[in-house]
Image (tube, grey):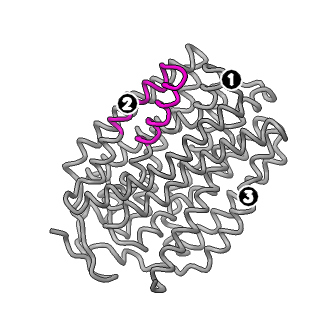
């Protein structure tokens, strides 16, 4: 393996591991939500708002990360962000009130913003377009696997040692990995990108006139509404509606999420990269079809019992997570390298504003007013909307460029 390939795969490995601990930290909260409710005596809507506040600060910090990366380079900004959210995780030890949890979540949100925006941009400059589906699938498998580990860690340690202890698990590894990332050299900006100049791809202002970017972003927003709501409330749903213990509910959903994350996230990326040889629409097509197939599986997960319910959860998660690599690759490939960080900031702002910021609170509100089972109809509707948007976005998929070396991009036939 050449030194350049070694650095590329090393960067991907370190950033994927950091992303893993990032999502462990996020989902531990969902695993111990019922324990927190016993201590702080707040409504479901309040705990949904706790997640929403995290994403509001995370989303508002995102637009500042592109300019920071231009001034200081991407690597130091990624490292500082990882150190901030890892350090803020340790502040859970001093959290003894609901307001303290809110403050802790705002700090973690600000720290994570730099990492989540700049890491995929860094990775994109390590690999050519025709490999980005699988690469993004690997990088983003940290989302379901880290989320699953958070459920399992929280479900096991929370009831036994108290809700604060599970939060400490990701802090030390996050610091070590962030410092290890300093050994990776900064790749040239846009080294694998084409030299075609178009206003909709090359400028921030042009994003509003870029239908490939807009449809991928809006499709991701609706998918995030569904997936975010399920991640926050599914363990609680299993506990309340189906009588699972807190530990049992977290382990069931956590193991399902981990298994599907490991397989579906990577498989979707490889599948769309393979189909990209034959059609430029591959990233959009794989995402749209997998989401459409996920609708009946979701319905089965919510409105059946026993083995049928468990099978529904497993299949629905697999089909939702299958689009992780393709959809993120579609966003990254829809713009050119100079504006990619800012485009991802806009992407993150939109899909959190329309996605998991309202979904956690809305499902909690509907649960308080009606029932948690009925509240889960909202994610089903969101999945259907995401699928429709992505089917529409197929006709705007950009051309694919083959690269013969690090500096030349040639349109594929």
User: Which residue is depicted at the point 40% across and 38% down?
Assistant: 222
Q: Main secondary structure of the magenta part?
A: helix
Upstream in sequence: badge 2 or badge 1: 1
Label 1 sits on residue: 43
Determine the residue positioned at 34% across, 32% down.
Answer: 384
Q: What segment carries the magenta color?
A: 291-320
Q: Nearer the viewer, mark 3 or mark 2?
A: 2
**Label 2 environment density (alpha carbons within 10 Å; few <14, some 14–19, many ≥20):** many
What is the distance, in whole Å, between disc 2 and disc 1 at their CAs?
A: 29 Å
Viewer-nearest residue: 383 or 91: 383
Mark 3 crowd level (few <14, some 14–19, many ≥20, 10 Å Cα): many
Was residue 347 drawn as part of the magenta stretch in this picture? no
Is the residue marked by circle 1 packed among few (<14), some (14-19), or many (20+) residues within 10 Å? Answer: some
* Residue assigned mark 3: 171
Name the residue carrying label 2: 295
Cα–Cα gap, marks 3 and 2: 37 Å
First in sequence: mark 3 vs mark 2: 3
Q: Quadrant of residue 190?
A: bottom left
Mark 3 touching mark 2, by CB under 8 A? no
Q: Residue at x 26, y 52 (%)?
A: 209
- Where residue 112 appears, as percent x and y from the top left, is 60, 56
Q: Secondary structure at mark 3?
A: helix
Please check the rendered image and state whether residue 316 is part of the magenta-colored stretch, yes or no: yes
Rendered-image quadrant of the C terminus: bottom left
Query: Which numbered circle lies on residue 179?
Result: none
Q: Is residue 208 above or below residue 368?
A: below
Looking at the image, is 295 positioned above or below residue 267?
Answer: above
């Amino acid at each position: 393996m050449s030194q350049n390939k070694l650095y590329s795969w090393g960067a991907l490995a370190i950033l994927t591991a950091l992303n893993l601990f990032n999502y462990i930290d996020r989902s531990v909260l969902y695993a111990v939500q019922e324990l927190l409710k016993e201590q702080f005596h707040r409504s479901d809507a309040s705990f949904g708002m706790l997640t929403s506040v995290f994403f509001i600060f995370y989303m508002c910090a995102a637009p500042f990360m592109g300019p920071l990366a231009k001034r200081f380079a991407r690597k130091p900004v990624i490292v500082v962000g990882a150190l901030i959210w890892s350090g803020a995780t340790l502040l859970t030890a001093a959290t003894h009130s609901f307001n303290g949890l809110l403050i802790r979540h705002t700090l973690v949100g600000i720290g994570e913003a730099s990492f989540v925006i700049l890491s995929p941009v860094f990775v994109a400059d390590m690999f050519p377009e025709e490999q980005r589906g699988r690469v993004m699938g690997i990088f983003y498998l940290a989302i379901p696997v880290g989320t699953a580990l958070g459920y399992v860690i929280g479900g096991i340690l929370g009831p036994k040692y108290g809700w604060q202890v599970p939060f400490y698990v990701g802090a030390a590894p996050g610091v070590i990995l962030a410092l290890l990332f300093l050994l990776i050299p900064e790749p040239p900006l846009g080294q694998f990108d084409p030299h075609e100049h178009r206003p909709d791809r090359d400028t921030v202002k042009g994003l509003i006139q870029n239908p490939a970017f807009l449809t991928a972003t809006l499709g991701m927003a609706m998918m995030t509404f569904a997936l975010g709501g399920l991640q926050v409330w599914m363990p609680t749903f299993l506990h309340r509606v189906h009588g699972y213990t807190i530990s049992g509910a977290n382990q069931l959903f956590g193991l399902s999420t981990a298994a599907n994350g490991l397989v579906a996230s990577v498989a979707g990326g490889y599948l769309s990269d393979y189909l990209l040889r034959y059609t430029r629409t591959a990233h959009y097509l794989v995402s749209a079809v997998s989401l459409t197939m996920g609708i009946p599986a979701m319905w089965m997960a919510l409105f059946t019992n026993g083995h049928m319910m468990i099978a529904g959860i497993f299949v629905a998660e697999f089909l939702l997570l299958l689009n992780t690599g393709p959809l993120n690759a579609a966003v990254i490939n829809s713009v050119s390298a100079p504006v990619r960080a800012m485009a991802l900031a806009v992407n993150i702002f939109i899909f959190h504003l329309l996605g998991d910021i309202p979904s956690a609170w809305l499902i909690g509100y509907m649960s308080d007013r009606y029932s948690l089972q009925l509240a889960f109809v909202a994610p089903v509707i969101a999945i259907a909307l995401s699928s429709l948007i992505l089917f529409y976005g197929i006709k705007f998929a950009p051309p694919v460029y083959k690269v013969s070396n690090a500096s030349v991009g040639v349109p594929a036939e």
